Amino acid sequence: MMHPLGRRDFLKVSAAVTASLLPAAAPAAEAKKPVIRKAVKYAGIKVNGDDLAKFELVKKCGFQGVEIDSPSKLNLEKLVAASEATGIKIHGVIDSVHWNDTLSHPKEEIRAKGLKALEGAIRDAAVVGADTVLLVPGVVNKDVTYEQCYERSQAEVKKALPLAEKHKIKIAIETVWNNFITKPEQLVQYVDDFKSEWVAAYFDISNMIKYGVPPADWIRKLGKRMVKFDFKGYSNSKQWVFIGEGDENWPEVRKALAEVGYDGWATEEVGGGDEARLLKIAAAMDKALGLN
């Protein structure tokens, strides 16, 4: 004998029938991985041979790019030829005199030398097809306050912006132990104050560990301002260590890179070396960055 359904039972049955007719829910989309290309500092490649031999070794060891110094004794035309022959990108140029001829120096003539070097690095970047010039903007010390470093370096970098815009080269401000920018909010403000797309952030993940803010937090706060990053390994208890042996917390770093949609270069800064050393570095980078 069948009994009529009560209202509550009717609603339950109706819900079950409706659910059975709906398409199965799609699985949660996997978080998009950051796009990361590995590079080495060109000055650290220790192998006998010309530029082409060095580029071939870099490629053999699993890297996609290099970063060069400026000024230097390198033959830029030969570098470009080696890059084109191997497909290894010269992704960036390092202003190699920014620690000596600082843009924050009390003497105007020293700042002028620093500006000339920065402009030279921009021109070199244009020649080799790089898209950034790495810059340490200044140094805070007994002769230069934080405010002076900020104001002087901003003034000098602004003078180089027309040239950077002309060649489509970003001036990428690096985080180092210069007693200047030690918090992510400071780097955000420093970059944003230029109000220019040709100034960006070059974050050194390991350099900033000792200042207490986790690298992943820096990345999230920098967001799209961060166009490239360096790393090695830093431990609060052991100081400088090899890649993957420090306090970087790479799983969280990778998560943060994905969240900000990172698409750029990761360049090692552990001294380079011969083929065996470069292979070891590449393997450690792959593991840290989740590329293997």
Image: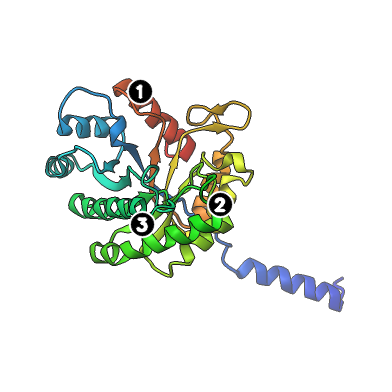
Q: Nearer the viewer, mark 2 or mark 1?
A: 2
> Which labelled disc corresponds to residue 171?
3
Residue type, numbered disc 3:
Ile
Q: Is residue 28 visible?
A: no
Residue 87 in the image: x percent, y percent? 20, 43
Question: Residue 276, can we see it?
Answer: yes
- Measure the C-alpha gap from mark 2 to mark 1: 30 Å
In the rendered view, tell whether residue 208 sits above or below residue 173: above
| Residue nearer the viewer, 114 or 232 | 114
Q: Quadrant of the N terminus?
A: bottom right
Of the two numbered discs 3 and 1 on the same chain, state the one appearing first in sequence: 3
Marks 3 and 2, how far apart in space? Answer: 19 Å
Quadrant in the rendering for residue 47: top left
The label shown at residue 218 is 2
- At x 56%, y 66%, the residue is 23
Mark before the other along the chain sequence, 2 or 1:
2
Residue 32 at x, y = what percent?
47, 54
Question: Is residue 10 shown left or right of residue 99?
Answer: right
Q: CA distance from mark 3 to mark 1?
A: 30 Å
**Where on the picture, by quarter, is residue 226?**
bottom left
Q: Which residue is mark 1?
A: 277
